[in-house]
Image: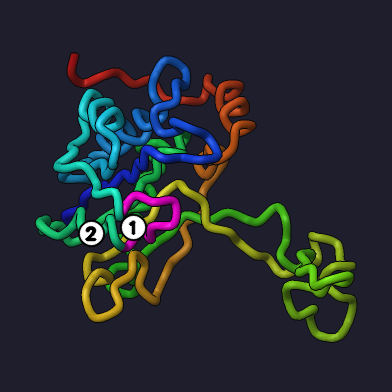
């Protein structure tokens, strides 16, 4: 399968300003994703989609391609992924694309290769594969507040003990997607209702720190404490 890595890196992060180029163990955050993608050996190219010239410069320093800056209308905090993905793929002919978000610095080249091996085995039986992990906060214990009262977010089981009063270990297993990776056949971008995932989505179970994502300031602090687990990387150009 010919495959391209797509790395989204907006310049306008609100929760952690400047997140994508935030220094982490001597390198900007985005560098770890670029390095893992390049080292994996599964991609024809590693393409960074960004609206910020600063991020584009850093991406090129670590060996990624930045064909253009993303238009502002595709780089807002609520802009859907399908818009920038479709634009990034419009002039490319790879059969597969993989979205690797720069907020996951502990996702390694080995992680990517393991995911692609699974995706290859599944073949045409799936449209895409997406990284997931077991939830820590179960949706069966979540509530919707309505005025002075609240109601459970989910239907509460089979009429026995309600989920909100059940031990976690006895609840149905629920997985949540994380930012580690997504892989999809190009055909999900076709048709009147293009998506980045299609209808048949397979799970890729991340292990250890592979699914760790920097989304809040406290995540930055934890990543720094775990920096010994980061791969060694270097700039590609001066």
The CA distance from mark 2 to mark 1 is 7 Å
- Quarter of the rendering containing residue 28: top left
Indicate which disc, 2 or 1, sits on the residue closer to the N terminus.
Answer: 2
Is residue 81 located in the magenta-colored stretch of the structure? Answer: yes
User: Is the C terminus in the top left, top right, bottom left or bottom right quadrant?
Assistant: top left
- Quarter of the rendering containing residue 202: bottom left
Q: Residues within 10 Å of mark 2 (few under 14, many from 20)?
A: some
Is residue 133 located in the magenta-colored stretch of the structure? Answer: no
User: Taking 45 as reference, is 23 above or below it?
Assistant: above
Depth order, front residue of 112/104: 104
The residue lying furthest to the bottom in this view is 159
Residue corresponding to mark 1: 183
Find residue 27 and name its label: none
Residue corresponding to mark 2: 96
Task: Name the residue at 85% across, 68% down.
Answer: 164
Q: Is residue 210 left or right of residue 61?
A: right
Depth order, front residue of 194/18: 18
Main SS of the magenta part reads loop
Q: What stretch of residues is rendered in magenta?
A: 74-82
User: Taking 212 as reference, is 94 above or below it?
Assistant: below
Q: Position of residue 48 (x, y in %)?
A: 26, 41
Q: Residues within 10 Å of mark 1 (few under 14, many from 20)?
A: many
Q: Is residue 73 left or right of residue 137?
A: left
**Residues at discs 2 and 1 in contact (Cβ within 8 Å):** yes
């Amino acid at each position: 399968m010919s495959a391209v890595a797509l790395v989204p890196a907006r310049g306008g992060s609100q929760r952690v300003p400047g997140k994508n180029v935030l220094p982490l163990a001597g390198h900007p955050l985005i560098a770890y994703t670029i390095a893992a993608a390049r080292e994996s050996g599964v991609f024809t190219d590693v393409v960074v989609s960004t609206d910020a010239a600063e991020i584009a410069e850093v991406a090129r320093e670590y060996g990624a391609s930045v064909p253009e800056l993303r238009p502002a209308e595709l780089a807002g905090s609520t802009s859907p992924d399908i818009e920038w993905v479709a634009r990034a793929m419009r002039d490319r002919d790879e059969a597969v694309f993989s979205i690797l978000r720069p907020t996951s610095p502990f996702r390694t080249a080995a992680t990517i290769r393991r995911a692609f091996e699974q995706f290859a085995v599944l073949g045409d039986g799936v449209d895409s594969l997406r990284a997931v992990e077991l939830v820590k906060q179960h949706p069966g214990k979540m509530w919707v507040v309505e005025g002075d009262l609240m109601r459970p977010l989910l239907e509460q089981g089979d009429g026995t003990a309600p989920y909100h009063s059940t031990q976690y270990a006895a609840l149905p297993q629920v997985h949540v997607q994380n930012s580690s990776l997504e892989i999809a056949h190009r055909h999900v971008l076709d048709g009147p209702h293009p998506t980045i995932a299609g209808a048949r989505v397979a799970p890729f179970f991340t292990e250890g720190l592979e699914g760790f994502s920097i989304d809040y300031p406290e995540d930055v602090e934890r990543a720094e404490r775990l920096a010994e687990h980061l791969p060694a990387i270097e700039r590609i150009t001066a």
